[in-house]
Amino acid sequence: KNNPRVAVVTTEAAQLMTKATEAFIGWITAKAASHKDPKSRRRGLDYHDLPPTLEHYPDQLEFLTDLLPPKRPKWEQLGLDPPETPAPKSKSKSKGSAAKSPA
């Protein structure tokens, strides 16, 4: 209905697209679960589990690379230089009072 060139969509076509979508979601979910970090105690999938799956199946999932890019820091997404890391604070304490000179 969103495409003006398509006047009628049959019930069978809509059902076929529904089944194909369900099969695709099941397939990509299974693949993402198999690439999940085995040390992770999470039971579900997260956004971070999908980009590695795209890397393992580049030919089949190339159309998703723009939709599911790997998570990157905001500065990198904007093309900026990385933020400067603050210098570590020195642990040496200076004495607050200087030696007094005799008056």
Image (cartoon, grey):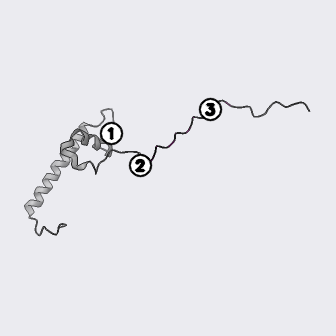
Which image quarter is the N terminus in?
Answer: bottom left
- What secondary structure do most residues of the magenta stretch adopt? loop
Residue farthest toward the right in the current orientation of the protein: 103
**Relative depth, front residue between 69 and 22:** 69
Q: Is 63 placed above or below 13 here?
A: above
Residue 56 on the magenta span? no
Tell me whether the residue at label 1 lies in contact with that at label 2, contact meaning CB atoms closer than 8 angstroms: no
Q: Which mark is residue 42?
A: 1
Q: Marks 2 and 3, Cα distance to the nearest angstrom?
A: 33 Å
- Label 2 crowd (10 A; few <14 / some 14-19 / many >=20): few
Whether residue 23 sits left or right of residue 77 in the image: it is left
Q: Tell me the SS state at disc 2.
A: loop
- Say which quarter of the image contains residue 29: top left
Task: Evaluate whether residue 88 shows in this view.
Answer: yes
Badge 2 amino acid: Gly
Residue 16 x %, y %: 10, 56
The residue that appears at 68% across and 31% down in the rendered structure is 93
Q: Marks 1 and 3, Cα distance to the nearest angstrom?
A: 39 Å
**Residue named by callout 3:** 90
Q: Tell me the SS state at disc 3.
A: loop
Whether residue 101 sits left or right of residue 70 in the image: it is right
Badge 3 amino acid: Ser
Tell me whether the residue at label 1 lies in contact with that at label 3, contact meaning CB atoms closer than 8 angstroms: no
Q: Earlier in the sequence, mark 2 or mark 3?
A: 2
**What range of the chain is rendered magenta?**
76-93
- Say which quarter of the image contains residue 43: top left
**Residue named by callout 2:** 79
Q: Tell me the SS state at disc 1.
A: loop
Badge 1 amino acid: Arg
